[in-house]
Amino acid sequence: MKKKITLKTKNNRYSINIEPNSMVKNLTSIISQNKKVVFLIDKKVFYIFKKLKNYKNQKYIIIDCSEKLKSFSNYEKISEEILDLEIDRRTIIVAIGGGTLGDLSGFIASTILRGVDLILFPTTLLSQVDSSIGGKNGINSRSGKNLIGTFYQPKLVLIDPKILKTLSKREILSGYAEIIKHGIINDIKFFNWLNKNSKKILNLNSEVISQAIYKSIIIKRKYVLKDEKENLKNNNSRAILNFGHTFGHALETYYKYNKKLTHGEAISIGMIIAAILSYKLGYLPLNHLNNIKNHFKLNNLPMSDNKMFNEKIFKIIEKDKKNDNKKINFVLIKKIGSAFLSNNLNLNKIKKTLK
């Protein structure tokens, strides 16, 4: 079953299409309709690209993807490779891969020749429900994750849930962390639906996972439409989508983006910390905290890390891009389905509360 979502921002309007078994058909269509296309392809899914009859005649770059891909050196290297292909401003960059490739491709598309069109084919669950939606892109620095980047909306996002069958269980669970996040911050009915259907999602039941992807995108779209560039400092702020990301990104930075933690695993731990903090500050009822914890336990989502309160973690949090005038803009929850942006916390208060 095909589902279509339209995302309209101030200056852009594009479609997000969800359709099983559609990747080869959609790639063929892009090639037939556009003369100038450069494909950036995660080497893990290159086998799909090879199904195209004329793939050898296309301009493409095969990329070895991990979170370490998002660096200045790789940004420069891949940009130069694209420029060597004699592109112009009518060229379309098509990114086929997960969130790291999408983030880097978006940053390249927004800056090369001062901006060319971008189409995203997200191939991981995490990128399908989160990172390919809304136009955020960027690379990491020594100081932290995603501190260098732009807001740059794609022209089209094409999602094929069937591609998820190639992923490991760890990668599926990593993406599921972002799905449950959407229920926690915005929709208790969706959270309860996930309680009933999480096992089907993790086992890649086609109908159920398509519905989970669709609902996640609808929730994320709500915040992007109200606050495309995270300018607001209220409960409509796009920053609400960063629930779990303050500690989660700090953990990823601490581990230098290695395989110790995936992005979803780090965010999972960050969400539990944020929920506990919400409870200890008097916002979140104990039964809601326990419901969140029980869901995470039931689905084997990580809930802690022995370095999560390391002093170096707090040093990294000090440099979080969401901070304002030494105040930590921290996403907390009042109940499942209701998140808010707290801007009256500092590191000392967070440390004392979490002890």
Image (tube, rainbow, N blue to C red):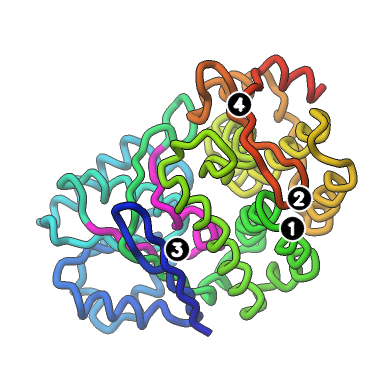
Q: Nearer the viewer, mark 3 or mark 4?
A: 4
Report crowding for label 4: few under 14, some 14 to 19, many 20 or more residues within 10 A (C-alpha).
some
Disc 4 to disc 2, C-alpha distance: 20 Å
Disc 3 to disc 1, C-alpha distance: 27 Å
In the shown orientation, is residue 9 left or right of residue 176? left
Sequence-wise first label, 3 or 2: 3
Residue situated in front as seen by the camera: 249 or 327 = 327
Disc 3 to disc 2, C-alpha distance: 28 Å
Disc 3 element: strand
Residue 215 at x, y = what percent? 60, 66
- The residue at 42%/47% (across/down) is 228
- The residue at 38%/68% (across/down) is 15
> What's the amino acid at mark 1?
Ile
- The residue segment tinted magenta is 117-139
Which residue is under mark 4?
A: 343
Which residue is under mark 3?
A: 122
In the shown orientation, is residue 122 left or right of residue 299? left
Quarter occupied by residue 355: top right
Which residue is under mark 2?
A: 336
Q: Nearer the viewer, mark 3 or mark 1?
A: 1
In the shown orientation, is residue 264 left or right of residue 299? left
Sequence-wise first label, 1 or 4: 1
Q: How many marks?
A: 4
